Amino acid sequence: MVMPTLKIIECQLAIIGRGMAGMASAFFAANRGISTVQIGITGGTIFASGLLDLMGVHPIEKKLPWRDPWAGIDALIRDIPNHPYSRVKKKGIQAAFDEILSFLKEAGLPYYRRKDRNVEMITPLGKVKRTYCVPQTMLSGVRALEEKRPCLLVGFRGLNDFSARQIAATLQDKWPNLRAARISFPDTDHVSEIFTGEIIAQALELSENRKKLIQAVSPHVKDSQAVGMPAIFGMHRSQEIAAELEDKIGVPVFEIPTMPISVPGLRLNDTFARYLSLKGVRLLPQSRVLEVGRESNGSFVLGVGNKTIDYTLRTKGIILASGRFWSRGLYADRNRIRESVFDLPVYQPRDRNGWHRENFLDSRGHPVNRAGVETDDSFRPLDSSGRPAFETLFAAGSILSHQDWMRMKCGSGLAISTAYAAVNSFLRSNG
Amino acid sequence: METQVLIIGGGATGTGLARDLALRGVQCIVAEKGDINAGASGANHGLLHSGARYVYTDPAVTKECREESEFLKTLAPHCIENTGGLFVAVEGDDEKYVADFPHLCSRCGIPVRTLDIKDARELEPALSKNLIAAYAVDDATIDPFKLSLENISQAQQLGTTLLCYNKIVGFKKSGNRIKSAYLLNTKTGEEIIVEAGQVVNAAGVWVGEVAALAGISIGTLYSKGSLLVTDNRLTKLVINRLRRPADGDILVPGGTVSILGTTSVRIKSLDKILPSIEEVDLIVNEGAAMIPVLEATRYIRAYAGVRPLISSQGGIDDRSVSRNFVLLDHIQNGLENFATIPGGKLTTYRFMAEKTADLVCQRLGVSSPCLTRTEPLPCTQASKWTEPGLGPRWWFKEKHTNESLLCECEMLSTSVIDSVIKSIQKQNGTLSLKAIGLRSRVGKGPCQGTSCGERVIGYMYEQGLLDSEQGLTDLRDFLCERWMGERPVLWAEQLIQAELKEALYCGLSNLDL
């Protein structure tokens, strides 16, 4: 029994981070019966597109897209032996995905994948993207694109981050039977702007709004054999809502990823959060690690809070899944990149001149994106002498060095698989 | 095409000259290889000099600046914020140099007021506590884009033709005259032949290249100056460091932001005019001595312009009307209908245009007098949206909240973008995000195009203004153009912003492939 005034929390494992790597770490830890506390600002996952990339492009300078992600990983490990994937190995990556995907399915957020082949999905700008898993609600879009079926894309007036006409125009050579329509979402004629898809998704939780949407979309369908919309099929019951729309509209419907804040990202976040809370993972919300101390037995004592220390946390192990710059896991001043919690050594270019290339879209990518924490094979960050900085500190996700998830299209795979490996390493270290 | 005068260059000088000639009833074509103010006219401090900066070195320039800035404050008030300026010195600065300042100002007729250190710091709390001297002068700020857009806009109304994205690629001479000029449209590849009575080379830093096409060599040296944009306005007034002109010694308010510069770096080629990381660090370090918060403040981008330095060697007929600028009539080069005006200070652009127009009119036998000294510069829709802070004012205060916002940083709604698009179409411009950005605040906020880029493109597709992959090509150009200015200031908050930009455009959307 913890007395509320004391605010000292004991656990075996503290997860620092609330992005995909943090969520996955907490998930794997909870599944393994480890008493876990999660610290972090609501982060990465709400900015996630909902697609789970595994391995898309390598070498990036050749813009070589992989149809078989596992073959891509083989090539990647051969060419970049420091890439985190080479430490997890294919078997580990596969096991991590299996565990996550079967959970998501049970939790009502099923994903679709082909074991040995990336699928192709359209992006909000009208490009085609190879990814590994898509939410089930996007599957009909994958198929429609594959077969170039006559298809209608619907956008909503006021939802400015999504233009169906842009996607249709951009893809017209590849997919001539793609048409676009812009409609008012039911009962939104009086507003000028619908700021995010979340607002529409919330509205679609009500059957009355679904009926109105079906009425509004149906006249535009004509000879289309599928209908795509921005990802708005409800917040919690996307499968059921998709099925109902499909049934009433009469052709398969699908969701298209959107710019953040994206509904599929929110769904992932909520699904993980609900499960973790059910499994007894304690969340210290909107908090950061402000102080780090160690006890003689090797335990960490963390001062945690937002601006001032609200909790003291005693933990055996830590998984650092604090992300990169956007999530504040890394911080750069004019001269150096630092790791924010432990001031761990950060692998980085020699000076700022080496961080970014002059061309934003330089096909080699920006070296700053390969900066990060270096680890041993157990994902323990190294100190300046090249030895593990702490016996029970592990790192997972995008804070790891020698990867460029944005260009390699491996973000979710990196997060999930290194979280898996880090949690398992902790278990092993814990005897 | 035929015209009385062909003006090469659509910067401050070229557009100012077009207006001056148009007001005298002379018909002109302005050929610009990019868009309005593509060179140094669009890459400077936006400082309307009182003249005080030149009291040590050049009384003639001082006088010109004083007179011209007074003219412009009266005739083009919508382009100017009459901020006032300070000259300040900090511990370690040359005290003798400082002590001479008020006396030299008075001698040149520059109004100057000595301030108590305490008063100066009350007036501008951002000033260093190591301040040793402060003087108030009549410096102001000027929006160079609004200025050039209004100049060209009135000229167009009076019959001038503007040809953007038209690069001069050759001249045909006949005896001692240029008979025609060959223009190449860099967007369409189309070639136009212009037969002009007079040709004026107002190509700014590129005057040497243009003159070379006419077989004339102008010894031009290039001096690059880089500047930084902060995400907030740090001072009310223009702040000058009171020392011999050096790096990072002027901080100029630019509406909602501040602009810190500059440097002076000799460069050999004009292919890539980029601010470097070394320059940025130098400017920050130097500026921080005067305004300490410059060390910690967030910068959203940097940019660089190149000053042409015309050497007086090489057989040039140096008939300068002042040491401030050079007007070459090319008589000694055997041409009687060609002139070069390389440009100079923005503050005296009108004066340069007047002197050039005088020469052109004399050659054309036109006797109408210059009107830009007395005719106010109109205030039209053409430049309305260059104004920082107008977006929020218009949206909130003037209750246009029923429109949705395409740019959240600067609060620009759909009808603002409509109006900017219309003005580009009026100027025969090529519609692009860059052209929209030049005439508005799109891409200028802290996000540097992250969300307004894709939104404005999406909007243009929805309006039927874009087809096929045009929008993605344009978006790439725009993002890459913004990036060159972001790159040297990517640390702390702005690096986080850049990471988000890449995550959305590359990680999520595959714009990199």
Image (tube, rainbow, N blue to C red):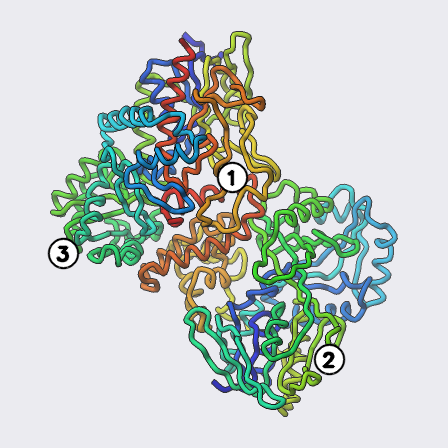
Helix, strand or loop at mark 3: loop
Q: Quadrant of residue B17?
A: bottom right
Q: Which amino acid does label 3 sit on?
A: Lys
Which residue in the protein does label 2 denote? B317
Do dots 1 and 2 share one subunit? Answer: no
Q: In this view, does A393 lie above or below A69?
A: above
Left or right: B190 in relation to A120:
right
Q: How far apart are marks 1 and 2 (CA)?
A: 52 Å
Q: Which of marks 3 and 1 is in front?
A: 1
Q: Nearer the viewer, residue A426 or B493?
A: A426
Disc 1 packing (10 Å; few <14; some 14–19; many ≥20) = many
| Mark found first going from the N terminus, 3 or 1 | 3
- Residue B376 in sight in this render: no
Label 2 with label 3: CB-CB less than 8 Å: no
The structure residue drawn at horizontal position 58% and vertical position 77%, both measured from the top left corner, is: B213
Q: Is residue A177 above or below residue B180?
A: above
